[in-house]
Amino acid sequence: MTSPQYTQLNCTINGKEIHKMIDVRASLTDVLRNDFSLTSVKKGCEVGECGACTVLINGEVFNSCIYLAIWAEGKEVRTLESLQGPNGELSDIQQNFIDETGVQCGFCTPGIIMSAVEIQESGNDYTREELREHLSGHLCRCTGYQNILNAVEKTIKK
């Protein structure tokens, strides 16, 4: 049953088809965190500036804090949780962030990794400067960007 404030959302989240009544005013960040406990999607600035809430929608990065959940209707949404192996193994990009010391507090890391996944899955070869530009929508106050760039570069050069 729908009302003006609520509607059914039908989409795929991390490979699982979902059918959920949601508030039409809810951001995708809120739905992912509150309704599906996908806490890798961080609430940072909530205005699309910091990148902490970055997810992939149909293979493209979006700031989920400024993306209404209803816009995900019929789409495939991926969060950092989608990268986990069947026994909890880390993906290559996650391991490279650890190996290259691209993580300190970790708050920004899930969003940056999802942008790196988009880069990796594009199959394109990027220069370091192009990688820097692709990752420019993320703010990191701890690590510094060189180690993050090293981790992304290491992943796509494999």
Image (tube, helix red, strand yellow):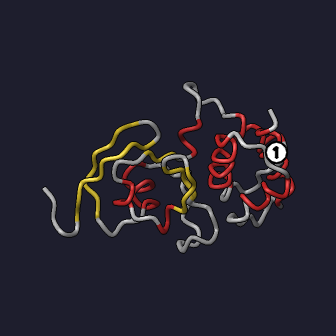
Which residue position is annotated with label 1?
A: 153
Residue positioned most to the left: 1
Q: Relative to residue 66, is residue 100 drawn left or right?
A: right
SS at circle 1? helix
Q: Quadrant of residue 105?
A: bottom right
Q: Residue at x 59, y 29 (%)?
A: 85
Q: Residue at x 48, y 69 (%)?
A: 66
Q: Relative to residue 148, is residue 2 drawn left or right?
A: left
Instruction: Give the percent coordinates (x, y) of residue 106.
Output: 69, 54
Q: Quadrant of residue 131?
A: bottom right
Assess disc 1: are there few (<14), some (14-19) or many (≥20) residues with their C-alpha within 10 Å of its C-alpha: many
In the figure, 112 relative to 51: above or below? above
Q: Relative to residue 50, is residue 71 drawn left or right?
A: left
- Total number of numbered labels? 1
Q: Nearer the viewer, residue 75 or 105?
A: 75
The amino acid type found where label 1 is placed reads Glu
Instruction: Give the percent coordinates (x, y) of residue 139.
Output: 71, 66
Q: Residue at x 43, y 53 (%)?
A: 32
Instruction: Give the percent coordinates (x, y) of residue 126.
Output: 79, 48
Q: Residue at x 56, y 60 (%)?
A: 53
Residue positioned most to the front: 124
Locate the N terminus and report the quarter of the image it occupies. Answer: bottom left
Residue positioned most to the top: 87
Q: Relative to residue 9, is residue 101 drawn left or right?
A: right
Instruction: Give the percent coordinates (x, y) of residue 109.
Output: 68, 53
Q: Nearer the viewer, residue 35 or 15?
A: 15
Locate the C terminus and report the quarter of the image it occupies. Answer: top right
